Amino acid sequence: MSEPGDSVSDAIRQQLLRVADEKRLPFAVQVPNPSTLEAMKELDDGKGQRFGSVEELFRDLKEADPASERRRSGTQHGPHGGR
């Protein structure tokens, strides 16, 4: 609350005026998508992979994505590349 003695109602009113003025919430709204929720549950269950560095993570992602090799070599096929 901005001033000593402000009531909860005053504080809420000030926040609502701020929302109306700035046309945004005064805090970040972060709701994980289903894929992120699944990954979070997997980690909570003690599963999933962990990496010692960002470089290790990206190396693993490149190895797991066969399309990344096609993009690098220029042999992409499908609706946007290739023949």
Image (tube, helix red, strand yellow):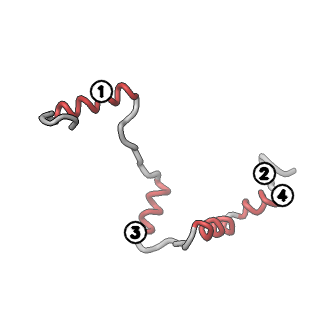
Residue extending furthest toward the front = 4
Quickly name the residue at label 1.
Answer: 17
Residue at 44% in and 68% down: 43
Kindly report the distance in space between the C-alpha atoms of the residues bearing marks 2 and 3. Answer: 38 Å
Q: Earlier in the sequence, mark 3 or mark 4?
A: 3
Q: Amino acid at mark 4?
A: Thr
The crowd level at tag 2 (other Cα within 10 Å; few <14, some 14-19, many 20+) is: few
Percent across and percent down for residue 69 are 76, 63
Q: Amino acid at mark 2?
A: Gly
In the image, taking residue 60 as reference, residue 37 lies left or right, namely left
Q: Secondary structure at mark 4?
A: loop
Kindly report the distance in space between the C-alpha atoms of the residues bearing marks 2 and 1. Answer: 52 Å
Near-viewer residue (28 or 79): 28
Judged by depth in the image, the label closer to the viewer, 2 or 1, is 1
Residue at 46% in and 73% down: 47
Quickly name the residue at label 2.
Answer: 78
Percent across and percent down for residue 74 are 83, 56
Judged by depth in the image, the label closer to the viewer, 1 or 4, is 1
Judged by depth in the image, the label closer to the viewer, 2 or 3, is 3
Quickly name the residue at label 3.
Answer: 44
Q: Earlier in the sequence, mark 2 or mark 3?
A: 3
Quickly name the residue at label 4.
Answer: 75
In the rendered image, which quarter is residue 1 located in?
Answer: top left
